[in-house]
Amino acid sequence: MSAQTVLTLINPQNGNLAFKIFSFDDGNYFDHIQRHNYHSMILVTAGTAKLKSGFTECDISKNALLCFAPYQPFMLADAKGIKGVSINFHSDFFCIYKHHREIACHGVLFNNVYQPPNVLLSETDMQNLFALIEQMKTEMQNLDLAQHELLVSYLKIFLITASRIKVAQHSEAKNKVEVGSEPFILQSLKDAIEEHYKTKHSASDYADLLNISANALAKISKNHFNKTLTDLIAERIIIEAKRELYLTSKAVKQVAYELGFNDEYYFSRFFKNNTNVSPKLYRDTVGFARAEA
């Protein structure tokens, strides 16, 4: 990778990465597990690869946008002729949690328990997103007043555009699902997890709530989400835990209690098993009490 293909902004307060855009023309950069303390987006322009991210595994090719939240593990295996552009941004630079109502990408592009982290793009979509990338590149080399504000504006437009594309695709997919019991059960399951994840942590709890056998619910979850029901519940708990650790100064013990864990140390083990970092390290490297600052 040549130096000319990389543009990076560093946070002057702590020396950490704030915002970065780089081009790549082979799969070597992503051929091993990536696990960063910032958001990553990869726009694939050519080639093929197998995306592995947590419990998700799928084939990708050109005209795909891949989106990963902080500490979400991912890699591109078996890459052939892969090319594209990657955008990285730290939550200190732009916080999707705080700007959720403006851009609505949290739960769409990032931290989506039920969908893979990739978006399929048309040629027009690609052109629009690349136009924004070029504007961001130009601004990154411009040291004039309000550079940060303009970059954030371009990034917001990029995220909103990508979110709209994914929502439209998801809506079309829902319309193509045949009418039957499983779509209703799937939505009921998602609603139940959303309502009860803080108090009900076992798969059997949700089988009882939905009046369906645990085995049948497990099969439905695996067939439609390629994840176990336990994985779905755990991921939803982790998303909320990350939000609390990022946005508030609550003690880890309090966060644990509010998420249904009576033992702080059990919660810490649960968090680390699912993210590979401790709650404290996550808070220290991704964010701390930003909403209270």
Image (cartoon, rainbow, N blue to C red):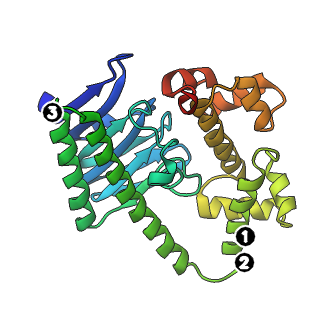
48 vs 168, nearest the viewer: 168
Residue at (34% x, 22% y) in the render: 11
Asked if residue 203 can be seen in this view, the reply is yes
**Residue 60's mark?**
none
Q: Position of residue 125 (x, y in %)?
A: 27, 63
Q: Position of residue 275 (x, y in %)?
A: 58, 33
Residue at (60% x, 35% y) in the render: 242
**Residue 181's mark?**
2
Dot 2 crowding, Cα within 10 Å, few <14, some 14–19, many 20+: few
Pointer 2 and pointer 1: residues touching (CB < 8 Å)? yes
Most extreme residue toward the bottom, as rendered? Answer: 179
Asked if residue 49 can be seen in this view, the reply is no
Badge 3 amino acid: Gln
169 relative position to 191: left or right: left
- To which residue does mark 3 refer? 141
Residue at (73% x, 58% y) in the render: 218
N-terminal label among 2 and 3: 3
161 vs 224, nearest the viewer: 161
Q: Position of residue 9 (x, y in %)?
A: 27, 28
Badge 1 amino acid: Ile
Q: Position of residue 80 (x, y in %)?
A: 26, 49
How far apart in space, not on screen, are marks 3 and 1 (Cα)? 51 Å
Dot 3 crowding, Cα within 10 Å, few <14, some 14–19, many 20+: few
| Front: mark 3 or 1 | 3
Reply above or below: 22 against 63. Answer: above
Badge 2 amino acid: Ser
Pointer 2 and pointer 3: residues touching (CB < 8 Å)? no
- To which residue does mark 1 refer? 185
83 relative position to 224: left or right: left
In the structure shown, which secondary structural element does the residue marked by tag 2 occupy?
helix
74 relative position to 291: left or right: left
Reply above or below: 104 against 283. Answer: below
